[in-house]
Image: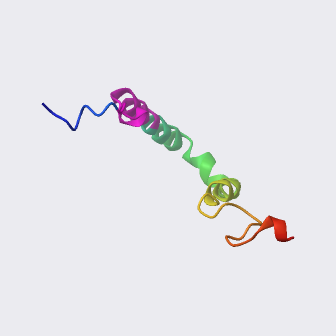
Amino acid sequence: MNSESNHGHAEPWYRSRGAVVAVMIAVILGLFIVREHWEHLTEKWIYLLLLLCPLMHFFGHGGHGGHGKAEGSNEQNS
């Protein structure tokens, strides 16, 4: 009897065979699109870099809770 595999936990979606295949197809298609449109991308690389700034700002604040609140601040004291 294998007690490790039967804990009642469902397998995460990203570990399923279908998800792995979908990610592999997406990577292959992405590389193909970049290869075919490389000349267009190199002309406008600065705009692509600027488009990354809001994404980095949005996803980069996950670790400290965002703007305006320090760890020890108390809203009732203001």
x then y, percent, for residue 19: 40, 31
Task: Indicate the quadrant where residue 67 lies.
Answer: bottom right
From the viewer's perspective, is 76 left or right of 21?
A: right
Task: Indicate the quadrant where residue 4 lies.
Answer: top left
Residue at left offset 49%, top offset 43%: 35
Instruction: Give the magenta range.
Output: 9-26
x then y, percent, for residue 11: 35, 32
In the displayed orientation, state which residue is furthest to the front. Answer: 76
x then y, percent, for residue 29: 47, 34
Task: Indicate the quadrant where residue 46 lies.
Answer: bottom right
Q: Main secondary structure of the magenta part?
A: helix
Magenta span includes 46: no
The foreground one among 72 and 59 is 72
x then y, percent, for residue 33: 52, 38
In the displayed orientation, state which residue is furthest to the top. Answer: 18
Quarter of the picture holding the C terminus: bottom right
Magenta span includes 17: yes
The foreground one among 39 and 70 is 70
Residue at left offset 55%, top offset 47%: 38
Residue at left offset 68%, top offset 54%: 58
In the displayed orientation, state which residue is furthest to the left. Answer: 1
From the viewer's perspective, is 7 left or right of 1?
A: right
Quarter of the picture holding the N terminus: top left
Q: How many numbered marks are there?
A: 0
The color scheme shown is rainbow
Residue at left offset 41%, top offset 36%: 14
